[in-house]
Amino acid sequence: MYNKVVNFIHELFQSEEFIPLHAPLFIGNEKKYLNDCIDTTFVSSVGAYVDRFEKDIANYTGATKAVVCVSGTNALHMALMLVGVERDDEVLTQALTFIATCNAISYIGAHPVFIDVDKATMGFSPSALKEWLVKNAEIKNNQCFNKNTGRRIKACVPMHTFGHPVLIEELVNVCNDYNIELVEDAAESIGSLYKGKHTGTFGKIGAISFNGNKTITTGGGGMLLFKDEELANYAKHITTQAKVPHRWEFVHDNIGYNYRMPNINAALGCAQLENLDRYIQSKRETAKAYADFFENIDGIDFFEEPENCFSNYWLNVVLLKDKKSQLDFLEYTNDNKVMTRPVWELMNRLPMFEKCQNDGLKNSLWFADRVVNIPSSVRIKE
Ligand SMILES: *Cc1c(COP(=O)(O)O)cnc(C)c1O
């Protein structure tokens, strides 16, 4: 039966060769803009493409303002600092996520607490969040504290898993009730919409990634999305060494970071963004083809976008029956020139985070034994 799947995927991508999980695609103005950087010598962290990329992303997503970073991981690090997370605070997030989410929390010296995901979204569950807070949280002086550890619960970081939006409106409401800041890890979900509005624009800050395996890439890079213009201006300041503007003096008014994306990466991003809607359309056609195909395959279910959502289908997901089938499927496909991957090891199973509090993670454990990502590159031939 798995040979039917392998054949279908080779046919879909019109190749008998190795089919990668997600390859980047450069069919627009990439070379032109990169040449422009070299011709003008503006290859580094100052340049017209940096400003343009920020404006273009803000326009595209509807954010008030966007600020570039050198990676999605440091975009998340900045976002958590900017909402006021401090050493020894707790940050609520998913165990079912990529390591970057938890690394960003750890850079500050804060501690993740793992909350379960929903079956329908694979992302942060507002009902699990509420249930955990009712049992474990108390409000003192308008701040939320964990009754067990005594630590402040400062922020919540939901992640739009594989491009599928979480129930973000409900999360906003729960976080508001408990005075918890909401940062969206929208690293995987550029162009994905919840009730018509872009993921990454619901929280106080959203973070996007442009790593080489994401829907569009700048080689490496990230972006912060803001509602609040002043906070965005401050983000720009501390991601550029916190230098006080002056014609020649080197005065810095804070501990700053060198997190600004170089112009050559931003140039790539501007060109990629021009084609993003075409890419997403192609990815959605792929998802439709998979959905139709797996309809007739026993024991393998295709994961479809949640209700009220428009997903970019960054990485397509199939669900196997159990752990054994998951491993058999991974082995067969990878032996037969179709790249597939299981979902990330749950964060609470990694040595750095095994002591962190969690809520039981019923659905996360269920997904961990079943999820496999299948090839999802944009299928536009030029
Ligand atoms: C890709 C990704 C990031 C950011 O990764 P970078 O490689 O640093 O750009 C963060 N969170 C999630 C969930 C991701 O998938």
Image (cartoon, rainbow, N blue to C red):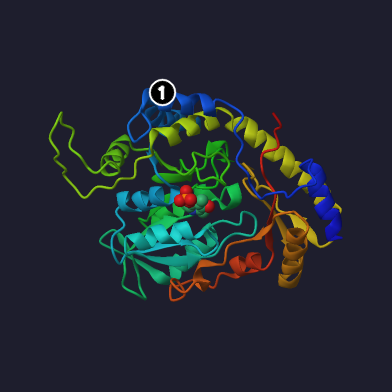
Please give left or right for residue 189 compared with residue 184 in the image.
right
Image location (x, y in percent) of residue 208: 47, 44
Which residue was labeled with disc 1? 39
Please give left or right for residue 248 compared with residue 97 in the image.
left
- The residue shown at (71%, 71%) is 323
Q: How many marks?
A: 1
- The residue shown at (53%, 29%) is 30
- The residue shown at (55%, 50%) is 160
- Relative to 294, is 50 above or below? above
Do we see residue 184 in this rendering? no
Q: Secondary structure at mark 1?
A: helix
Ligand 1 neighbours mark 1 (CB distance < 8 Å): no
Q: In the image shown, does 170 or 365 lie closer to the viewer?
A: 365
Q: In the image shown, does 336 or 372 lie closer to the viewer?
A: 336
Image location (x, y in percent) of residue 2: 83, 60
Q: Quadrant of the C terminus?
A: top right
Q: Quadrant of the rendered structure where residue 174 is?
A: bottom left
Q: In the image shown, does 320 or 200 lie closer to the viewer?
A: 320
Q: In the image shown, does 254 or 7 lie closer to the viewer?
A: 7
Q: Residues within 10 Å of mark 1 (few under 14, many from 20)?
A: few
- Relative to 366, is 44 above or below? above
Q: Quadrant of the rendered structure where residue 65 is?
A: top left
Please give left or right for residue 258 compared with residue 184 in the image.
left
Image location (x, y in percent) of residue 138: 35, 67
Do we see residue 302 in this rendering? yes
Q: Quadrant of the N terminus?
A: bottom right
Image location (x, y in percent) of residue 150: 31, 72
- Relative to 35, is 172 above or below? below
Q: Amino acid at mark 1?
A: Asp
